[in-house]
Image (tube, helix red, strand yellow):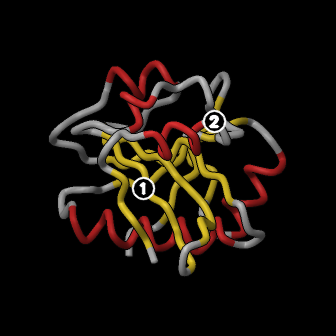
Amino acid sequence: MLQKINTIDHWVTEIISDDPVRPEIPIEFRINEAAEMYALWDNKQLLGVTCVSFTQGIPDSVDEMIESSSLNPDTVVFYTIWSYVKGAGRELLNKAVDQILFDNKLIKNVVTLSPKSEMAEKFHIRNGAWKFRENQDTINYAYQLQ
């Protein structure tokens, strides 16, 4: 089951400490009017978590993502994802994309702001993305709109 996390509480603060990609991003940026978190559950077990930001345009850095956050976005940026169970990341990503596109009809771009790592590249390419742009410190992988 996919859960949109839209309140800041103790358990959310705890799971953010597990973020292997961007643990430095504060909770106030992860959950606000232009950002959301999603969790994938199987019964009562947490399988994985992802964080997204809604922006105007495709950012090439964390700073640009923060600066381009928008209440009228055309882009959803997946900037971190982690799983507690092998294989949960793919299901989480697919369900979160479906939910976001259902809720936000004006989204034109589904992209990542990924670290430059072999693991990130393999994950996104295996899940149907393509390398849209290589930036100084990140890579934007793009996903086809459904």
Label 1, on which residue? 110
Three-letter code, disc 2:
Ser
Tag 1, which secondary structure? strand
* Picture coordinates of residue 17, whole percent (x, y): 63, 35
C-beta proximity under 8 Å, tags 1 and 2: no
**Tag 1: amino acid:** Val
The structure residue drawn at horizontal position 75% and vertical position 36%, both measured from the top left corner, is 116
Spatial CA distance of label 1 from label 2 is 25 Å
| Mark 1 vs 2, N-terminal side | 2
Identified at 46% across, 18% down, the residue is: 63
In percent of the image, x 42 and y 55: which residue is there?
110
Nearer to me, 63 or 135: 63
Q: Is residue 23 above or below residue 40?
A: above
Q: What number of labels is visible?
A: 2
Query: Which callout, 1 or 2, points to the residue nearer the camera?
Result: 2
Residue at x-position 57% and y-position 78%: 42
- In terms of depth relative to the viewer, which is nearer, 49 or 127? 49
**Pointer 2 local density, CA inside 10 Å: few below 14, some 14–19, many at least 20:** few
Crowding near pointer 1: few (<14 within 10 Å), some, many (20+)? many
Tag 2, which secondary structure? Answer: loop
Say if 100 sits above or below 22 in the image: below
Q: Residue furthest front?
A: 10
Residue located beneath label 2 in the image: 17
Tell me if 104 is positioned left or right of 12 in this view: left
Please name whichever residue, 47 or 114, is drawn nearer the observer in this view of the structure: 47
**Quadrant of residue 134 within the rendered picture:** top right
Q: Quadrant of the C terminus?
A: bottom left
